[in-house]
Image (tube, grey):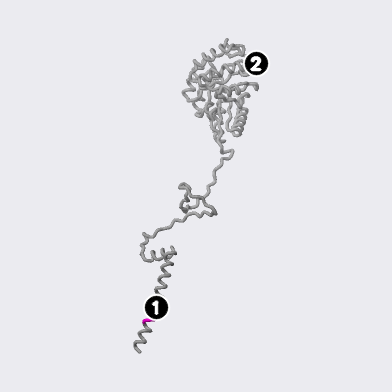
Amino acid sequence: MAARKSKKQDLRNFIIFALLLLVGVQFYFLYQSNESLRNFVLTSSKTHSPSQVPVKKSRPVVESSSVAPIKEEDKPVDVVAVAPVKATAKKVATPSQKKSYVALVIDDWGYSTKNCQYLQSISDPITVAVLPSLPHSDDVMACAHKAGKEIVLHLPMEAHNNSDEYPPDYLLKTDMSPLKIDRLLSDTLDKMPLVSGVNNHMGSKATEDKMVMTTVFKQLKHRGLFFMDSKVTAKSVCEPLALQANLPFAARDVFLDNVNEASAIEKELEALVRLAKKHGKAIAIGHDRSLTLQVIEKYIPVLKEQGIELVTVKRYIKI
């Protein structure tokens, strides 16, 4: 009886062992074929501290049925969380806020020094156009230079109609040879080394003449000076010739004091402001008169309130 029970027990143990062996074999083949299971077994067999746990960086997913090999420079970068940036509206200047530029040229200096005080009291740029060889031409240039003002030669030139009397060879005329024009201009400029440019005194006839202006521009180009056309005639050839010669050039927009009254001068200054705001810059000519300079001095704060900056003609050309 005891022998029969022992045989049954041995059979049961054999069957359990066979089943365990069978399960073990199946688990082995399943283990070899399943990477996830291997990772599970490996990670389960180790204990990680927080500092040892690797962090997998997320990368952008590329959806494509056919993906070309990724070059080193094309590898996707790690996604980094960036705080949102608030949009800031770009400040756009309104017409009243936009800065414009004005050059003021005061002609006919050299007859006296009575208005030199204004060159000191007006701290903003004003261009002083000095006639050559007058009794006080040198005095005015010295005063203007001391006050830090720009100085230009106010070059006397032939007009169509002129009742004033001038010394011989004082005006550059259309019947002069290019050689004579060049010599007269060169002699004048040699006596006025402080000038940075030239504008014409009268000259309605001369500024219409290509030979005269080509000769003048050649000398100015040689000396590195600019030319400002006073625009005393609508037929002036100065601008295209200056462009052709690559000569720094400007042209007058407004005459301030054709009518020598304060209200008239102020109206012209208002017109100057409108032109400057429309085109970004404008240039005006006045004359060596106490009233003109008084009105200008009074009006400069108004110009600044309108967003106008006063500049020299040399800077005006560069703007």
Q: Residue furthest bottom?
A: 1
Q: Which residue is mark 1?
A: 16
Q: Residue furthest left?
A: 2
Tell me if 24 is positioned left or right of 215 in this view. left
Tell me if 279 is positioned left or right of 11 in this view. right
Which x, y percent locates residue 78? 46, 52
Q: Which residue is mark 2?
A: 160
Q: Amino acid at mark 1?
A: Ile
- In front of the other: 143 or 232: 232
Residues in magenta? 10-16
Tell me if 269 is positioned left or right of 116 in this view. right
Q: Is residue 95 above or below residue 262?
A: below
Q: Residue at x 46, y 51 (%)?
A: 77
Local SS, label 1? helix
Which image quarter is the N terminus in? Answer: bottom left
Q: Amino acid at mark 2?
A: His
Local SS, label 2? loop
Which x, y percent locates residue 162? 63, 15
Which x, y percent locates residue 168? 57, 10
Residue 111 in view of the camera: no
Q: Is residue 186 magenta?
A: no
Q: Which mark is residue 203?
A: none
Q: Is residue 26 above or below residue 241?
A: below
Crowding at mark 2 (Cα within 10 Å: few <14, some 14-19, many 20+): few
C-alpha gap between disc 2 and disc 1? 133 Å
- In front of the other: 254 or 266: 254
Q: Is residue 34 above or below residue 269?
A: below
- In front of the other: 76 or 243: 76
Please report whichever mark, 2 or 1, sits nearer to the chain's N-terminal start: 1
Q: Is residue 11 magenta?
A: yes
Which x, y percent locates residue 60? 49, 54
Between circles 2 and 1, the one closer to the viewer is 1
